[in-house]
Image (spheres, helix red, strand yellow):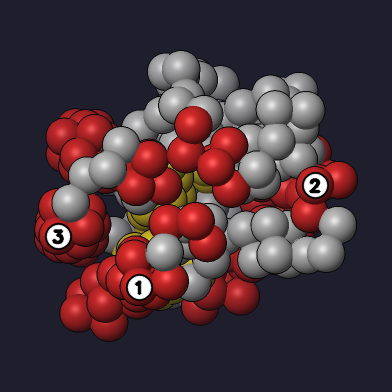
């Protein structure tokens, strides 16, 4: 499998002392090449999806690939996630991914690093809209995985940031996971579910993350 990585920016979720961003998984690219007729699911995310700090195959995208096989879905998986990526980075590279791989489904898991870098929320919203529109124009179904910021960012900012994912999903009529780390970052013992850096979720958290994605994804798997 092809892994795309760039060093993640830890300060954002260190402020949270819990939540983080992603790593690439699965044999997706090789399988997609070998089975060109199978519908392809592409994940465009950051370190939360890129298996940052985990052994290969432990992240939620790898677990998704495994679940698809177990439940006899024909979809292959390509994890095009890059640690540290922003919505602007995802937007810039999405066109090539769509042209080369022609996916049936695109999962967009980006935005956390935008907040980390203090980028304008309007830009994050615009980039997510543009990515959704491009994927749909290429014939793909879209799922947006939302993120939240820690309380120290302020209640108003937190609501606006969390809300922009819902706004984009509603405007583009896409599937939505409101908070990918629900059940992990918001649990009473959340500190025990993150790596020593207090940034990236442990392997045991990734099945919960997949369970957040799965209900929103299932309807998209149907023809």
Horizontally, residue 117 falls left or right of residue 222, namely left
Q: Which residue is mark 3?
A: 122
- Near-viewer residue (57 or 7): 7
Is the C-beta separation of discs 3 and 2 under 8 Å?
no
The secondary structure type at the circle numbered 1 is helix
- Near-viewer residue (136 or 186): 186
The secondary structure type at the circle numbered 3 is helix
Mark 3 or mark 2: whose residue is earlier in sequence: 3
Horizontally, residue 11 falls left or right of residue 167, namely right
Residue pictured at 28% horizontal, 60% vertical: 140
Q: Residues within 10 Å of mark 3 (few under 14, many from 20)?
A: few
Q: Give how far across and how far down residue 86 sits, in percent.
A: 30, 38
Label 1, label 3: how many angstroms apart (C-alpha)? 15 Å
Q: Give how far across and how far down residue 41 sits, in percent.
A: 45, 50
Foreground disc of the pair 1, 3: 1
Does residue 206 lie above or below 195 as drawn?
below
Q: Which residue is mark 2?
A: 191
Mark 1 or mark 3: whose residue is earlier in sequence: 3
- Near-viewer residue (107 or 197): 197
Foreground disc of the pair 2, 1: 1
Label 3, label 2: how many angstroms apart (C-alpha)? 31 Å
Q: Which residue is mark 1?
A: 156
Residue pictured at 38% horizontal, 40% vertical: 116
The secondary structure type at the circle numbered 2 is helix
In which quarter of the view is residue 15 placed?
top right
């Amino acid at each position: 499998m092809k892994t795309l990585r760039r060093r993640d920016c830890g300060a954002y979720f260190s402020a949270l002392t819990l939540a983080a961003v992603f790593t690439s998984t699965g044999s997706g690219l090789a399988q997609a090449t070998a089975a060109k007729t199978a519908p392809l699911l592409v994940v465009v995310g950051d370190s939360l999806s890129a298996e940052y700090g985990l052994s290969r195959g432990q992240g939620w995208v790898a677990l998704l690939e495994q679940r698809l096989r177990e439940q006899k879905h024909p979809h292959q998986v390509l994890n095009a996630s890059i640690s540290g990526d922003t919505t602007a980075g995802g937007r810039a590279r999405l066109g090539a991914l769509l042209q080369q791989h022609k996916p049936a489904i695109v999962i967009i898991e980006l935005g956390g690093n935008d907040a980390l870098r203090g980028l304008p929320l309007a830009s994050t919203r615009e980039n997510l809209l543009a990515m959704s529109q491009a994927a749909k124009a290429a014939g793909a179904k879209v799922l947006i995985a939302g993120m939240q910021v820690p309380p120290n960012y302020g209640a108003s900012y937190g609501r606006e940031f969390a809300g922009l994912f819902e706004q984009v999903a509603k405007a583009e009529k896409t599937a939505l996971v409101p908070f990918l780390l629900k059940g992990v970052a918001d649990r009473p013992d959340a500190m025990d579910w993150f790596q020593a850096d207090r940034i990236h979720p442990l392997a045991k958290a990734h099945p919960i993350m997949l369970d957040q994605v799965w209900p929103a994804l299932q309807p998209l798997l149907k023809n």
